[in-house]
């Protein structure tokens, strides 16, 4: 991904309220706001334009991250229609400053964004299938550039919807593969920009420690959620990870694998047996 200079403007001087994002030498513009600021957002003249938008929130029953990806020729009108959706708590809008996004362009963008979000696997989508419009080759290239700027701005505006779970696919530093072993369990993973990822096919203990229920109930809740959503499936005497799974820290990743509290800095080791703590101390 190319380098970028991002300009973030805070109309109210508060980073949790309305934000306007731009990238140098780019014709697009992003606007982001919490749901409580929706009325102020709807007053912005940019919302008279066509573009794509994102609604972010969580499933009220499972707590899973939930997103809606949409497109509209008049963003303001479409967002008003989403007031009836209960799950979302924030919105991000992308429009073109030179007003050159046609219906075909924004439908193409919506489709590409949905493809990438499903590949990233961080959010469940509250969408039905989108269309797949055809564009001339030159227009497709223009929209891929527009999409690349969306990828850059979304994390700055608070969402990693399009960020790969394994970490950035293009980075100057290759993270060392680490192992977490206990009894008959072996898990593999490495640090990422957001925490720590455990790789698909890693294993975790089948039965949690008895003390976990009283001493670390959050670990139980997290494990049960992973079992419920199919990330952990029972296989003989262990659980297996069915997909790459990112955690907030090496310790949380190790705790899920151990079935109880664990120090990730000492639990994760490289192939030679050197701990993550010692690796990072070098």
Image (cartoon, helix red, strand yellow):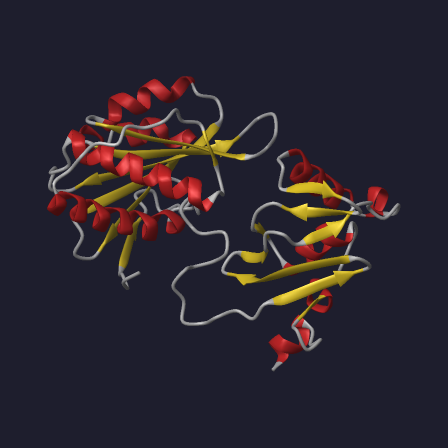
The quadrant of the picture occupied by the N terminus is: bottom left
Displayed quadrant of residue 17: top left
Number of numbered tags placed on the structure image: 0
Is 72 situated above or below 113?
A: above
Residue 104: x and y in percent read: 17, 32
Residue 244: x and y in percent read: 56, 51
57 with respect to 205 (left or right): left
User: Residue at the location (16% across, 47% down)?
Assistant: 142
216 with respect to 90 (left or right): right
User: Residue at the location (19% across, 27% down)?
Assistant: 73
- Name the foreground residue: 20 vs 74: 74
143 with respect to 84 (left or right): left
Is 123 situated above or below 262?
A: above
Displayed quadrant of residue 207: top right
Is 255 situated above or below 63?
A: below
Residue extending farthest to the front is 236
Residue 40: x and y in percent read: 31, 30
User: Residue at the location (65% across, 72% down)?
Assistant: 270
User: Residue at the location (26% across, 61% down)?
Assistant: 5
49 with respect to 82 (left or right): left
Q: In this orientation, does residue 125 appear?
A: yes
- Name the foreground residue: 47 vs 107: 107
Is 33 situated above or below 25?
A: above
Residue 83: x and y in percent read: 39, 20
Residue extending farthest to the right is 210
Q: In this orientation, does residue 18 appear?
A: no
């Amino acid at each position: 991904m190319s380098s970028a200079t991002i300009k973030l403007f805070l109309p109210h001087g508060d980073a949790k309220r309305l934000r306007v994002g731009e990238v140098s030498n780019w014709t697009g513009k992003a606007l982001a706001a919490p749901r409580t600021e929706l009325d102020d957002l709807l007053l912005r003249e940019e919302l008279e334009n066509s573009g794509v938008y994102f609604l972010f929130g969580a499933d009220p029953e499972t707590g899973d991250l939930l997103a809606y990806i949409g497109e509209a020729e008049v963003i303001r009108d479409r967002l008003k229609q989403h007031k009836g959706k209960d799950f979302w708590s924030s919105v991000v809008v992308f429009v073109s400053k030179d007003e050159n996004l046609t219906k075909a362009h924004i439908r193409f963008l919506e489709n590409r964004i949905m493809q990438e979000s499903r590949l990233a696997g961080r959010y469940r989508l509250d969408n039905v299938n989108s269309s797949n419009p055809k564009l001339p080759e030159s227009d497709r290239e223009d929209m891929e550039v527009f999409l690349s700027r969306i990828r850059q701005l979304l994390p700055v505006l608070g969402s990693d919807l399009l960020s790969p779970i394994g970490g950035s696919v293009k980075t100057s530093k290759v993270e060392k593969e680490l192992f977490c072993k206990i009894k008959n369990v072996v898990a593999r993973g490495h640090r990422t920009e957001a925490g720590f990822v455990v790789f698909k096919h890693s294993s975790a203990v089948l039965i949690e420690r008895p003390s976990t229920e009283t001493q670390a109930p959050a670990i139980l809740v997290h494990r049960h959620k992973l079992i419920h959503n199919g990330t952990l499936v029972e296989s003989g005497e262990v659980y297996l990870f069915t997909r790459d799974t990112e955690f907030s820290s090496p310790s949380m990743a190790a705790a899920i694998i151990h079935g109880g509290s664990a120090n990730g800095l000492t639990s994760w080791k490289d192939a030679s047996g050197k701990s993550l703590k010692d690796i990072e101390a070098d």
